[in-house]
Image (cartoon, grey):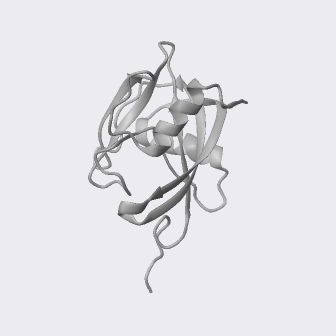
């Protein structure tokens, strides 16, 4: 029996977190060779929502798995209809705002992530995932809900 894949065989549900520091920078990851999609693109950290898991909990779990930190989610951004035509994938992504609560970010998944870095929201990398580009634009425009 073939296992169905989220995002390819059915619409996947995932998301990400725009983690901000006091300097107004956001933490981004450069997607590596074992990523589900958009290899070589920069994106905010996040991942898939598992069955029975609330989206916000999924993002907290994913951030801890990817970066070894605990976060405080304090805002909600509009969702992204992430349709990646070149890769024949379709995701609905929930987007959050957060700050680091505990720990120092480090690359915990070097097989999926080539590098991490803090970037000014006004000087983001050119090869930026749609979910991150839209989240940054919405945040800068004040289009978010404070939780």
Q: Residue at x 33, y 44 (%)?
A: 41
At 32% from the left and 39% from the top, the residue drawn is 127
Residue 12, by quadrant, is bottom right
Q: Is residue 7 above or below residue 63?
A: below
Quarter of the image for residue 71 reads: top right
| Front residue (pair 91, 34) | 91
Residue 14 lies, with reference to residue 105, above or below; the image says below
| Extreme-bottom residue of the structure | 1
Instruction: Please count the marks in the image.
Output: 0
Q: For the N terminus, which image quadrant?
A: bottom left
48 sits to left or right of 146:
left
Image position of 59 with respect to 2: above or below: above
Q: Is residue 120 above or below residue 132?
A: above
Front position in the image: 132 or 57: 132
Q: Residue at x 64, y 49 (%)?
A: 55
Picture coordinates of residue 8 (x, y %)?
A: 45, 69
- Which residue is the extreme one toward the top? 23
Tell me residue 65's x, y (percent): 45, 43
Q: Quadrant of the C terminus?
A: top right
Q: Position of residue 69 (x, y in %)?
A: 48, 31
User: Residue 36 at what x, y percent from top left?
Assistant: 38, 57
Left or right, 53 with reference to 113: right
């Amino acid at each position: 029996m073939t296992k169905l894949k989220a995002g390819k065989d059915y619409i996947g549900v995932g998301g990400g977190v725009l983690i901000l520091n006091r300097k107004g920078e956001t933490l981004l990851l450069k997607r590596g060779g074992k990523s589900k999609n958009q290899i070589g693109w920069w994106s905010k950290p996040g991942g898939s929502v598992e069955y029975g898991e609330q989206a916000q909990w999924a993002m907290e779990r994913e951030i801890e798995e990817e970066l070894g930190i605990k976060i405080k989610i304090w805002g909600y951004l509009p969702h992204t209809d992430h349709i990646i035509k070149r890769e024949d994938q379709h995701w609905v992504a929930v987007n959050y705002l957060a700050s680091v609560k505990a720990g120092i970010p480090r690359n915990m998944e070097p097989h999926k992530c080539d590098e991490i870095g803090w970037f000014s929201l006004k000087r983001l990398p050119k090869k930026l995932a749609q979910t991150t580009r839209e989240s940054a634009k919405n945040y800068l425009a004040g289009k978010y809900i404070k939780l």
